[in-house]
Image (cartoon, rainbow, N blue to C red):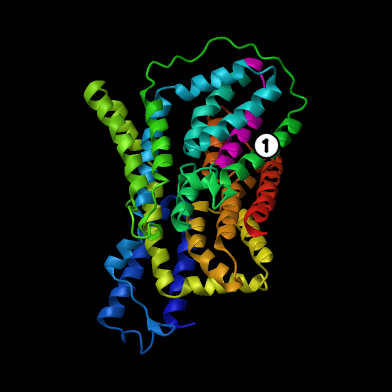
Amino acid sequence: MSPITITALIIFAITYILMLAFQKIRPYVTVGSALIFVALGIIATVNPTLFGEGFFTVGSGTFEYSIASALSEIDWNVIMMIAGTMGTVYLFIESKMPQLMSDVLISKMPNVKWVVVALSLFAGIVSAFVDNVATVLMIAPVALAFCKKLGISPVPSIICIAVSSNLQGAATLVGDTTSILLAKAANLDFSDFFVHDGHVGMFWVVQAGAIVSAMIILFMFRKDKEKIEFSGRTKVEDKFPTFLLVGTVLSLIAVSFIPYKDAANGGFYKPDITNGIICIAFFLVGIIRELLIKKNKDIVKNAFKEIDYYTIVLLTGLFVVIGGIKSAGVIDVIGDAIASLGAGSPFLVYTIIVWMSVILSAFIDNIPYTATMLSIVPVIAAGVGMNPTVLYYGLLCGATLGGNLTPIGASANITGIGILRKEGYEVKATTFMKYGVPFTLSAVITGYLLIWLIWGA
């Protein structure tokens, strides 16, 4: 490896170590690392011999990373989608429509066992279109309410809701940040998650995993047969936020049939930031309505506060960092190393990607991990001569579901445990894993096998 490649690899490793050690300042860590790569790019242009002759040599070329190229690495479509969707989801939550939907669902169930299964499946369905954390915040209070009425612990119910939310985040383009990142890297659109190149899409793979994991939940709660007496339903006075969310999804589906420039073959195409514009536009419609028609300034302020700026800044810095290590040849080095571990076997490489993602995502944030691996996957695929699609989907499966192994593996899990803590319930790691491990293994194994049978065989 050349000196700049080794340097970039060290900076990247330190960046990850600092993100793991100081989770509260991870955005600052990635931005700081991004600035270092930009500074190295400027030095390579202004004074390429500052650190010695040949320091900036990468293969047969040289390391080039200007401010302009760094900014071009930032995926504004992803950033806009995250911001717009989160804002609309907040308005949707405030309308109390999710609570009404949960109330209707519970009223149809005969006992606790089926309520837990139904709420878990419902949380998954909602999470396919709404942020995982927001889903837990919407549905966990419903579980708390019925558990209090029956005098039973809400811990198992809320754990199941959290892990189900993580599962369905991989089902659609807007289900989770990892899905949004994958769509960009693999050039996928909303409809591709349902049907992709003549094959069933990731949505159906996730549903298969949901069915298998629901059977696991049903077995684990087989003794909870207490009857439920349900009275009263949440009143929803404003249905407009629901229309906004539905409009966002339908619009994303509609534009998914319009190709991007690369696939347009000279015909009509859509801009790269189309999906982001749609998400932002529907959010702004909701904000303008709240501000000008309903005169509700507080909900407007809160809607902007609820946008996850932490993740946005983290991703912005990470995009620049990944662009830097790519220019320095680090991506090729890591990709070749993983390909060599697979000994040239596509199935073995696929297996390594899936289960490595499961294990790592149980302990580290899957967003930076996924963002990094998405750049490495094409190199790995080229190294073993296989279609990268199966590796993309394997990565999504492992990285999204792996977080369910531990209570700190996913934001939805942390949120659910935080809700329980406020209610006076301290959840031990062993308690969480009692439900999280069988749920995760059943769902991952199902996805692991189906993805290979559909795209890899």
Report the predominant secondary structure element of the magenta stretch: helix
386 sits left or right of 283 in the view:
right
67 sits left or right of 352 in the view:
left
Q: Residue at x 64, y 53 (%)?
A: 454
The residue tagged 1 is 211
Question: Mark 1: few, some, or many residues within 10 Å (few <14, many ≥20)?
Answer: some
Q: Label 1 amino acid?
A: Ile
Q: Looking at the image, how many numbered discs can be counted on the residues? A: 1
Give x and y (percent) for residue 65.
33, 72
Q: Name the quadrant of the C terminus.
A: bottom right
Residue 427 to residue 453: above or below? above
Query: Do we see residue 421 in this rendering?
Result: no
Residue 27 to residue 34: above or below? above
Give x and y (percent) for residue 316.
36, 55
Does the stretch in magenta take in 157?
yes
Q: Residue at x 63, y 21 (%)?
A: 147
Give x and y (percent) for residue 72.
32, 62
Give x and y (percent) for residue 180.
45, 49
Which picture quadrant has residue 423?
A: top right
84 sits left or right of 420 in the view:
left
Q: Which residues are magenta?
A: 149-168
* The residue positioned farthest toward the bottom in the image shown: 53
Residue 100 to residue 261: above or below? above
